[in-house]
């Protein structure tokens, strides 16, 4: 009988935990908390998203996004403004301080990806990416 430690699910959780631990450690050096980089990445691509749009794109609950945005606003990384057409909507914009984190945060992610994929060929990396996408699609079908 196979040990649970040999299961794909267990291995995946261990990879995720170690990846997150290393990301958290590096993010602290930039003054960021876990997952704040994802908000910044989205805003670098599309500044002025609403909090609802951020929640939807990151597949997180709105209160989680609100708390993160508030924390980031307090330290000067983002600012919120009411939508000009619909004042019920709060839009999130990067500040200059938030924009300045793009290069160091992207370098952090590229370095972490390089460590994660060390000793893998480009083909193996493409296969891993494809298999992870398929696993996510499989799990999403269950919803």
Image (tube, rainbow, N blue to C red):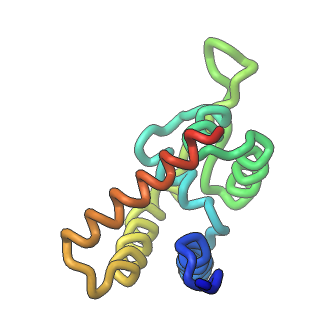
What is the count of numbered marks? 0
Query: Which is more toward the observer, 14 or 87?
Result: 14
Looking at the image, which residue is at 31% across and 85% down? 118
Q: Is residue 112 left or right of residue 93?
A: left
Q: Residue furthest front?
A: 1
Quadrant (top left/top right/bottom left/bottom right) for the C terminus: top right
Specify whether residue 106 is in view. yes
Q: Is residue 36 above or below residue 113?
A: above
Q: Quadrant of the N terminus?
A: bottom right
Residue 19 appears left or right of 70: left
Q: Position of residue 94 (x, y in %)?
A: 54, 47
Most foreground residue, 19 or 111:
19
With respect to residue 24, does 85 lie above or below? above
* 92 and 111: which is toward the camera: 111
| Residue 135 placement (x, y as % from top left) | 48, 55
Q: Along the horizontal axis of the image, is 87 left or right of 94?
A: right
Which residue is drawn at the image coordinates 55% and 83% (left, top)?
A: 6
Expressed as whole percent of the image width and height from the top left, the position of residue 109 reads 42, 70
Q: Position of residue 116 (x, y in %)?
A: 40, 80
Does residue 29 appear anywhere in the picture? no
Compared with residue 110, is residue 130 higher up or lower down, i.e. above or below?
above
Residue at the limit of the structure toward the top, as seen here: 85
Q: Residue at x 33, y 57 (%)?
A: 130
């Amino acid at each position: 009988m196979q040990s649970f430690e040999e299961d794909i699910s267990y291995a995946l959780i261990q990879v995720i935990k170690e990846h997150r631990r290393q990301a958290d450690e590096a993010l602290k050096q930039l003054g960021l908390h876990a997952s704040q980089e994802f908000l910044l990445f989205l805003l670098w691509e599309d500044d002025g998203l609403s909090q609802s749009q951020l929640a939807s794109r990151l597949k997180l609950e709105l209160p989680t996004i609100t708390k993160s945005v508030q924390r980031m606003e307090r330290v000067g990384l983002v600012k919120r403004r009411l939508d000009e057409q619909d004042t019920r909507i709060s839009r999130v914009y990067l500040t200059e301080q938030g924009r300045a984190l793009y290069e160091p945060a992207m370098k952090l992610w590229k370095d972490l990806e390089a460590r994660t994929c060390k000793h893998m060929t480009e083909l193996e990396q493409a296969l891993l990416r494809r298999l992870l996408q398929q696993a996510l699609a499989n799990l999403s079908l269950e919803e």
